[in-house]
Image (cartoon, grey):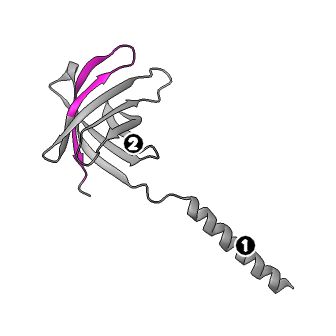
Amino acid sequence: MKKLISILLCCLFVITGLSVAKDIDTSKDELKYTGKFKWNRKADKEYDVKAVFVKNEDGNYDAKFLFDWNKKPYTYTGIVKGDVEKGPISGEIYNESKKRKRKFTFECAFKDGKFTGTHKEITKKSKETGVIYFSKDKS
């Protein structure tokens, strides 16, 4: 009897494990990009930026942009629409700061293996804030 219960419990764990594993979506490949952006007020300086795009259920991409500003790391998240392989793309991203929430849009064309475009802040009113360019990581 103990052996039968052990076998049934093992089967239950295997079946439960399989159904849990089925719920994990491993098809969500991250597309990683690196590049630079310029801020209009500091146009003589370029800042490094990394971007990660993951296709979502709507056919768009969840986006994350990571960069340092004044020696502090920042992450902006949002949505990217368009063809992330060949362009054009556009998106809306925002920070998660409780003190100073900010929201930006960007539009980029694709040429010679690189996305190039502009970004603007739309937190209170729409204003051009600079340029951005990035390409797919080779790794």
Where residue 9 appears, as percent x and y from the top left, is 76, 75
* Residue 110: quadrant of the picture: top left
Where residue 46 appears, as percent x and y from the top left, is 19, 32
Q: Is residue 100 visible?
A: yes
Q: Secondary structure at mark 2?
A: loop
Residue at figure coordinates x 47%, y 46% from the top left: 57
Choose between 131 and 43: the one closer to the eye. Answer: 131
Q: Circle 1 is placed at which residue position?
A: 12
Where residue 76 appears, as percent x and y from the top left, is 39, 34
Q: Amino acid at mark 2?
A: Asn
Choose between 77 and 43: the one closer to the eye. Answer: 77
Q: CA distance from mark 2 to mark 1?
A: 38 Å
Residue at figure coordinates x 44%, y 46% from the top left: 56
* In the image, farthest residue toward the front: 58
Q: Circle 2 is placed at which residue position?
A: 60
> In which quadrant will I find the C terminus?
bottom left
Residue at figure coordinates x 39%, y 18% from the top left: 123
* In the image, farthest residue toward the left: 112
Q: Secondary structure at mark 1?
A: helix
* In the image, farthest residue toward the right: 1
Q: How many marks?
A: 2
Choose between 124 and 95: the one closer to the eye. Answer: 124
- Residue range corresponding to the magenta coloring: 117-137
Number of other residues with Cα within 10 Å of mark 1, as a class: few under 14, some 14 to 19, many 20 or more: few
N-term mark: 2 or 1: 1
> In which quadrant will I find the N terminus?
bottom right
